[in-house]
Amino acid sequence: MAQQKEVWQRGPLPDITPLLQPVAHALLQAREEVNAYMEDFSPVLLWERPAGMASPGFHLQHLSGVLDRVFTYAKGEGLSPFQFAQLEEEGKDAEHGYTTKELVERFDRQVDLALEQLRATDPAILPDYRGIGRAGLPSTVIGLLVHAAEHTMRHVGQLMVTAAVLKNGVA
């Protein structure tokens, strides 16, 4: 596979305000890296926890879940019962046994939803207050969106290292 430029080096994305371009670039970069790195990753290894660290399955679930939750707070909404159920599931396999492809596709869909929300976000509301969680911890729309991007990239890095350790039998 030929090395291509990172997403942020490919220019602005259409229909996304310049202030949110870095968020969109980070999410697209994360999607590309997750898809490339998890291709052909054995589902047998999804729940392995080398050195007691979080499993690849957890990271994949968390990547989707945290984007959903943080973007929900950015809209000024509370979490739904379904979102709480997904949060509770993070780190656990489904009864039917998740495949790597299912978890990657869930993340891909969540990135698509996040990009739709970024396109629809009026730049004028970016400094607006948003409460986080039941406690209503203080943040802003832009603070939440930037946090979603950086948190996503942090977990992508952790996922890549954990997956590499497991693929190469270093654990």
Image (cartoon, rainbow, N blue to C red):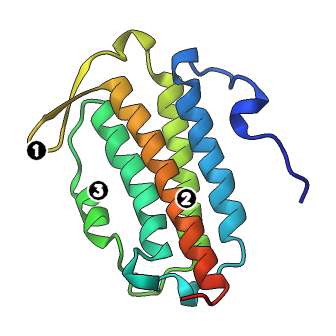
- Quadrant of res 9: top right
Indicate whether 44 appears above or below 165: below
**Label 3: which secondary element:** helix
Q: CA distance from mark 1 to mark 3?
A: 14 Å
Foreground residue, 9 or 93? 9
Q: Residues within 10 Å of mark 1 (few under 14, many from 20)?
A: few
Horizontal placement of 135 versus 154: left or right? Answer: left
Chain-order first, disc 3 or disc 2: 3
Query: Residue 26, how many percent across, how many down?
Result: 58, 39
- Mark 2 sits on what residue? 157
Q: Residues within 10 Å of mark 3 (few under 14, many from 20)?
A: some
- Mark 1 sits on what residue? 134
Query: Residue 93, how many percent across, how many down?
Result: 40, 82
Q: Residue at x 28, y 59 (%)?
A: 82
Query: Residue 112, how many percent across, how many down?
Result: 57, 44
Q: Are marks 2 and 1 in contact (CB under 8 Å)?
A: no
Answer whether residue 8 is visible to the viewer in this image.
Answer: yes
